[in-house]
Image (tube, helix red, strand yellow):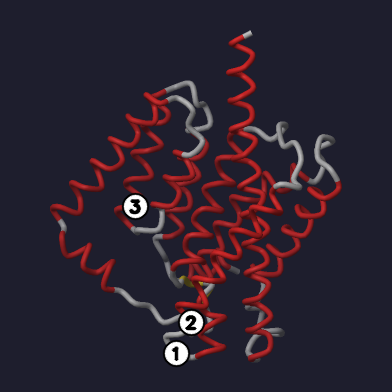
Amino acid sequence: PAVLLGFERANVDLLLFVVLCFAGVIAANFRILVNQLIASFVIACATILKIYPLFSFFALLIRQTNITFMLWIIILFFSMISVWYYTHPLELGYIFGANPVPHDSLVFGGGKLFYLLFNSKEYNVALTLATITSVLVGYFISRNISNLGDIGNRDINLYLIGVSILAGAFYFTTNYDYRCIFLVMCLPALLKMRVLPSVNERTRLITNSSIILVVYVAWAEFPLISGHIVTEYIEQIISWVLLTSIVSIGIAMLRQDKLSVLTKFRSNLY
């Protein structure tokens, strides 16, 4: 439904989805600087079209272990963004001046739950506290997620890009349901985690739960179950649980990245 809604609206988000998938795939080879520069260039172009792909750049950057590569892709990315917004100052005014109200029936975002509860500006405070709580809970859950070494760089890149966009959009702003298309990026890694012999039962439980929640959230606007205030509350609460769950897996992936780098460093010393 998220994809079909995007097609119905002929939205540029579908183009950004394809572009960001390409960036995640091409950046999977960390040893080639050209690949990283192309990925950085592509994400910068996407960020110029709409601001939220900016989150995917940090997901790409945080996996880098080569300092030289990091500097080059940062220089390229922020040079492109700076030149664009310097020559289009009205775009910045629009970005910082926008103040969407999360009450539409097709909205997918963390603020909607608190707008339903408070119906006032107080939901900003509640959203901030809930976001901090969600990230902290995700961090502690990630400590129980075991070895994910058999998942390839490509699937990890796609997962982290999808999660960063969803989490950034969900925690900090308001979006329409077709942004749920970025859940598709998370599925290859989640489906592989279900069958990896290296993962423990807790990891398998978190993975299976995430897949079930992805299906529910993607179909939550199905006409037979939508339209009632109770289902809106349930949908938003489940969305928070889903975001916390998939963020915890993303944190576990990043932790494993750092451990593998540390292991290689120690082996080189000896």
Quarter of the image where one finds residue 41 = top left
Secondary structure type for disc 2: helix
**Number of numbered discs overlaid on the protein picture:** 3
Looking at the image, residue 193 lies above or below residue 237: above
Instruction: Report which residue position mark 1 lands on.
Output: 120
Q: CA distance from mark 2 to mark 3?
A: 28 Å
Instruction: Report which residue position mark 3 lands on.
Output: 47
Looking at the image, residue 69 lies above or below residue 203: above
Q: Depth check: 127 or 270 in front? A: 270
Q: Would residue 180 appear left or right of 61 to someone viewing this image? A: right
| Three-letter amino acid code of the residue under disc 2 | Tyr
Q: Are marks 1 and 3 in contact (CB under 8 Å)?
A: no
Residue shown at the point (54%, 72%) measured from the top left: 110
Residue shown at the point (45%, 24%) measured from the top left: 66
Residue shown at the point (54%, 52%) measured from the top left: 162
Secondary structure type for disc 3: helix
Secondary structure type for disc 1: loop
Dot 3, how many residues are within 10 Å of its Cα: few (below 14), some (14-19), or many (20+)? many
Q: CA distance from mark 1 to mark 2?
A: 6 Å
Q: Position of residue 249 (x, y in %)?
A: 67, 49
| Three-letter amino acid code of the residue under disc 1 | Ser
| Three-letter amino acid code of the residue under disc 3 | Thr
